[in-house]
Amino acid sequence: MLFIKSTFFKRVLILFFFLIYNPVSSRANECGWFLSDFTSPVCTDAKYIFWTGTTITAGLSLLKQIKGFDEIQRRAVAKNHLKGLGKFGGDIGYGYLNGTYILGNYLLGGARGAKKASHMLQATFYTVGTTVALKSMIHETRPGYPQEHDSFPSGHASASFAFASVVLAQDGVLWGSLAHLAAIFISFSRINDEWHYLHDVTAGMTIGMSYAWGIYFNNMDYGKPYWFTVLPTENLDGLSIGYALSF
């Protein structure tokens, strides 16, 4: 009889945990339910990052148009601070940090790790999608490679700052600071090696940070679950990690 009672209370606790965590309790953000993750940079408190970054980017772009060149980018190229390290920054900026974080946390981190992995996956998905869409629409020429017309915005900056912002949100100030140093290095390497102008990089930073924090605020402030969700098992005797795709 004692075993039955213990099992009963165990199942009650599992159901209680699930009901608290479950998407049923989520609320619409400032722009409503529809595509709430896609609109999260402007429909959550991430809007302060988004609009500040957008204003800075617009100002830098306008200054370049007035002067006819990007003075900061020219100085960086002339001084070549990174030397051969610029290529290394470019190589690791192709989403490897994001992918390693996702796989590592999902495979080794349990339920908490699945949540962190899902946050990174969602932030990277929207960041890369938005970056590629803007590149295909704007067709800005790269400073050192005039035959290429996909300079704006910087994909390296957007992916690396999405990575850094998720690490800061999920793992705290110490790891977040180290991740931001890596993102700064990657982004500067793209200016140093003549792949991007400064406003390309600030645009990428804005996109990555806005989506990382926007999706985080959707989860924390509005209760919207990440794609990897903790679910009760069929017999209500434990918890499992489920996958639910919602935009």
Image (cartoon, rainbow, N blue to C red):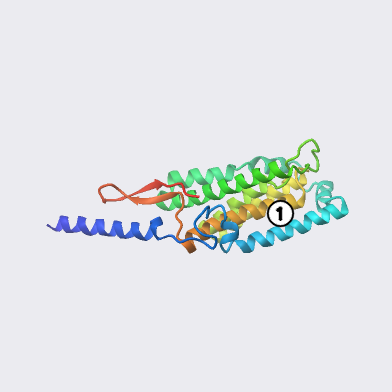
Quarter of the image where the N terminus is located:
bottom left
Q: Is residue 220 above or below residue 136?
A: below
Q: Residue furthest top?
A: 147
- Figure disc tally: 1
Residue occupying the point 45% across, 61% down: 27
Give the left or right position of residue 90, taking residue 66 as reference. left
Given the current orientation, which residue lies at the most extreme right position?
A: 67
Q: Position of residue 69 (x, y in %)?
A: 85, 50
Front residue (pair 182, 32): 32
Left or right of 48 in this view: 33: left
Q: In this view, does 201 lie to the left or right of 117?
A: right
Residue 49, position in %: x, y?
Answer: 64, 61
On the image, the x and y values in percent for residue 59 come to: 77, 59
From what the image shows, is residue 195 above or below residue 213? Answer: above
SS state under label 1: helix
Give me the residue at 54% from left, 43% from top. Answer: 99
Q: Residue beneath label 1, please? A: 202
Expressed as whole percent of the image width and height from the top left, the position of residue 82 reads: 75, 46
**Res 175 visible:** no
Q: How crowded is mark 1: few (under 14 residues within 10 Å), some or many (20 or more)?
A: many
Identified at 87% across, 54% down, the residue is 67
Q: Which of 91 and 144 is in front in this view?
A: 144
Question: Is there any visible trace of residue 141 in the rendered image?
Answer: yes
- The amino acid type of the residue labelled 1 equals Thr
Left or right: 9, with 216 as reference point: left
Q: Which residue is drawn at 51% across and 57% down?
A: 170
